[in-house]
């Protein structure tokens, strides 16, 4: 580890200890991941309470280059907007959508879309690991292909897409709140290392 990497790691630890916004977000994400693992639900109290904290923080904190209430609302709306189609397709639960919207309120618009990319990558890796562990990777890929074809056909026909219309049997489900927590955390770590 050279000096630049050491400095970035030290600044990451410093960010966690001094940046109340990031620390609060990480704690809320940890709580959501634990709830999702245990019960397959993310409580509204956690997501709505976390969103309220993010909005209050954006009002109370000193405002600098894009950190006010409109910034937080923009991140909230973007997090909601990027995940809502997956909920409408029945590919994700409402709690997952609300969790990403809450994270967006902490991250603002720029951070939210980048974090969502990390979340999708993390979710894809988790799905593949699950499929490989349970030896259903081939079935997962066939289901994905069949569902994608069905969605294209229904959209082309002007019918509202519904992933449940597929005849493919599910290979299982994952607590996506864990992927949101891990992906958002990975984004925060990566952002810290790229800002050095």
Image (tube, rainbow, N blue to C red):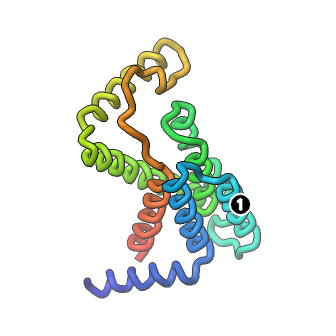
Q: Residue 89: x, y in percent?
A: 52, 31
Question: In the image shown, does 37 or 19 lie closer to the viewer?
Answer: 37
Query: Crowdedness of circle 1 by 10 Å Cα count: few (<14), some, many (20+)?
Result: some
Q: Residue furthest top?
A: 157
Residue 33 seen in the current view? yes
Q: Left or right: where does residue 26 sit relative to residue 6?
A: right
Q: Residue at x 68, y 64 (%)?
A: 54
Q: Quadrant of the C terminus?
A: bottom left
Q: Residue furthest front?
A: 38
Q: Residue at x 32, y 81 (%)?
A: 5
Q: Left or right: where does residue 58 sit relative to residue 83?
A: right
**Quadrant of the rendered image containing residue 148:** top left
Q: Residue furthest bottom?
A: 3
Q: Which residue is mark 1?
A: 49
Instruction: Describe the element under mark 1 as helix, strand or loop.
Output: helix
Question: In the image shown, does 173 or 62 lie closer to the viewer?
Answer: 173
Q: Residue at x 47, y 17 (%)?
A: 154
**Quadrant of the rendered image containing residue 171:** top left
Q: Residue 113: x, y in percent?
A: 50, 52
Question: In the image shown, does 63 or 8 lie closer to the viewer?
Answer: 8
Q: Residue at x 71, y 65 (%)?
A: 53
């Amino acid at each position: 580890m050279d000096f630049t990497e050491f400095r970035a790691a030290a600044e990451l630890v410093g960010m966690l200890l001094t940046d109340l916004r990031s620390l609060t977000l990480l704690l809320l994400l940890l709580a959501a991941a634990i709830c999702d693992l245990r019960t397959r639900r993310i409580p509204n109290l956690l997501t709505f309470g976390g969103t309220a904290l993010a909005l209050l923080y954006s009002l109370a904190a000193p405002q600098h280059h894009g950190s006010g209430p409109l910034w937080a609302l923009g991140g909230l709306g973007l997090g909601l907007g990027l995940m809502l189609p997956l909920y409408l397709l029945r590919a994700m639960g409402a709690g997952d959508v609300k969790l990403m919207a809450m994270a967006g309120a902490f991250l603002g618009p720029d951070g939210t879309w980048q974090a969502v990319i990390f979340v999708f990558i993390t979710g894809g890796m988790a799905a593949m690991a699950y499929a490989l562990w349970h030896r259903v990777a081939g079935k997962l890929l066939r289901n994905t292909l069949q569902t994608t074809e069905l969605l294209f056909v229904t959209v082309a026909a002007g019918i509202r897409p519904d992933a449940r219309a597929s005849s493919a049997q599910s290979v299982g489900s994952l607590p996506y709140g864990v992927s949101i927590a891990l992906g958002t955390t990975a984004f925060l770590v990566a952002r810290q290392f790229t800002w050095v």
